[in-house]
Amino acid sequence: MQSLVDAPRIGEKMAQRFISHFGCEEDAMAAILRGDIASISEIEGVGRRYAISLVHDVRSTKDGLDISSFLKTRDSVDIYERIIDSIKNYASTPYAKDKLHTYIPYPSSRKDLIDINRDWVENHMGYLFMLDDMDEISASFSRIKPLKNSPSIPRIRDRVIVTSNTDDYSTLKEKYGKSIEVQLVEDPLEFADVARSYPHVIAIGEPFLEYDFPEDTNPEIITNSRDIEEWHILPEKQISFFAFNHERIMNALNLAITLDKAGIPSIVNVDLSDLCNLMAAINPEGNIVEGRDGEIDRLNHILDSVDSELTKYVGHCNREINDLLQKSSITLSGNDMLGVIRDEVELKDILSRNISASFSQIINDARKEFIETLSMKQNESLFVDYFFPCELCYPVEADTSQLQKFKEQIKQQIFRREVTHKRDIAYELHGFRQPLKQLVMRLLDLDVGLAVARFGHSLKMQLAGFEDECGMNFKNGKNIFLCEKGIDVEPINYSLGSIMPPSQVPSSPVVLLSGVNSGGKTSMLELVAQCTILSHMGFPVPADELKIGPVDSLYYFSKSRGTLDAGAFETTLRSFSALAGAGSKLVLVDELESITEPGASAKIIAGILETLSEESNTMAIFVSHLADQILENTDASIRVDGIEAKGLDNELNLIVDRNPIYNHIAKSTPELIVERLFRSGGEVEKEFYRRLKNKFEKGC
Ligand SMILES: Nc1ncnc2c1ncn2[C@@H]1O[C@H](COP(=O)(O)OP(=O)(O)OP(=O)(O)O)[C@@H](O)[C@H]1O
């Protein structure tokens, strides 16, 4: 299958929706092939059922098999779906719960596909033993979600790309124009105009090397347009995917690290701790996290504190100068007095001469402390000289215009630094996009595998053994659906056909199962179906041991509810006619007798059993209360097994041995039910039940 439109159920319009959801056709195809129902269902107009059917259809086109290749009746599909629902209880993510629906039973003839699943299950069963605190691990898994493509970034307004080459201009405009301004300039004057309007100018082209840039601009020159890469021009775009998925990525990395420590490799070739550190450097908004870059923090600290610190130190200078002046006195020499009188000398100059050293000392001390407090570097400290006056004055005032210029410069530095930092991170992260997507998918798939392993572990299930002979044998089988209800389930041992039948027991692959009402016949039939379906999925089966011969298809017919009308009766017979010659199969039928009156039913069942027993590769269990009548209608050698009630216990419950007795017609023992009603009934009812009881005792 080359493209989406080749897939069944996908037309042109739907293909477009897939592409816009997954970003590209390749990713959309990959999602279908790996059975990512959860993501597919997120597409507008695609429901969960559609997604499951689509995956099944694509797989069936690929493998030549679908769910109906093995599960031949609606009732067998029902059992399969109930099993999947049971396994889903052990999955932690919606992804895994959905993906479980893509695992189907395969005919024995496709043992290759069964074996792939068996290996996969065995791996995950091994993983399960490597994990200590499964509750905590499940909680971590429940936080794993597929990574999404990030929406387009907001337009970058403080950066501009400038070029003087028209070809470069069209290419750059085409590539980056949606996110950033791209301008074509013809001369240095035009360049200066543009450059003054943006804090960050990326000038692309050799001619710029010869430009005389104005002092208040500091463009970044890239001589060759072929040298530029997206992470450099638009680091925000590269980072946006990681920022948008920040929480999901961190959850995935943390879980992957935990699993890695437990010995479960992440498979993806990524240094998880390195990537964790890198991710921790950005926040979900895509900005550099405070504390990651000391230089940005230092510059921000300067910007935040420079006003208040300057006010503080200017105040301090004024107090010191005030003090100094209060404590000072000067003696004027005769010459000084003459100079002042003749207007040749200013009194302020004489004053300055006397205290200028102390004044400068005060200003210098304040300046020094101010620089230290703000941890300024040498080039920054040069600015500070302009903040404080050099000549004697009182009160001292800071030069606010210099302060503004300084702040602008610091802002520029922060901005440049942030861009550099973002570029570094964008550069380091850009190779991780695919591996991270793979890592998350790997974790989600691990959840699927662990769900199957945990399901298997819950009932101490085992993988089945496949045999060549027609038959099946299981030890200590437990019906999953009964276990789920919290019933104390009695384990069942049973053998059918020629695989390990107990001695003296005919190795018939076609049997009639008779027995007491509520004895467990339906439950055993379900157990056989569960074992057959799970073993053919390559999943563990609910028994200590299961050996099973070839089964290419399963026909399960559950008990019909009452006598059928003519049409339904006809349809039922038709579905049984399809059984003849349908390859190696297992047929499980529950009380078919209710489809019509007992005499006719016995004849019909006898006929079906005869047909099936003539086939060498067919196993069948027919549950029926009409064993005697059925046998009367056939000469075929059909084994009858029975589940028998031994009586009633003190609480009037039936005492039943749930394990079928081989080669034994068990009575339905309705008399035990009558006995129970008789013993538990009131005076009036007792009389009624006594009459029924007598009928059984007299045998009339
Ligand atoms: N192996 C078992 N261990 C414990 N309880 C069981 C077992 N099998 C069946 N039961 C109990 O017996 C109940 C009746 O079982 P089931 O419906 O299979 O009997 P049945 O023989 O098919 O009855 P009927 O002939 O009336 O259809 C179950 O709901 C369950 O509570």
Image (cartoon, grey):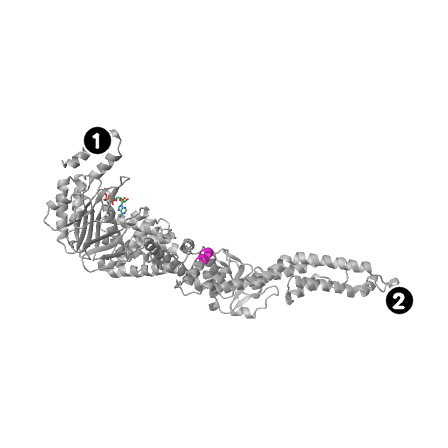
State how far apart marks 2 and 1 are (Cα). Answer: 147 Å
Magenta stretch: includes residue 332: no
Residue occupied by mark 2: 335
Give the main secondary structure of the magenta stretch. helix
Q: Secondary structure at mark 1?
A: helix
The extreme top residue here reads 684
Residue occupied by mark 1: 688
Task: Name the residue type under label 1.
Answer: Phe
Q: Is residue 155 left or right of residue 10?
A: right
Disc 1 residue crowd, few under 14, some 14–19, many 20+, Cα 10 Å: few
Q: Is residue 690 visible?
A: yes
Q: Which residues are magenta?
A: 244-251
Residue 415 placement: quadrant: bottom right
Mark 1 Cβ inside 8 Å of ligand 1: no
Magenta stretch: includes residue 246: yes
- Residue 482 vs 431, above or below: the answer is above
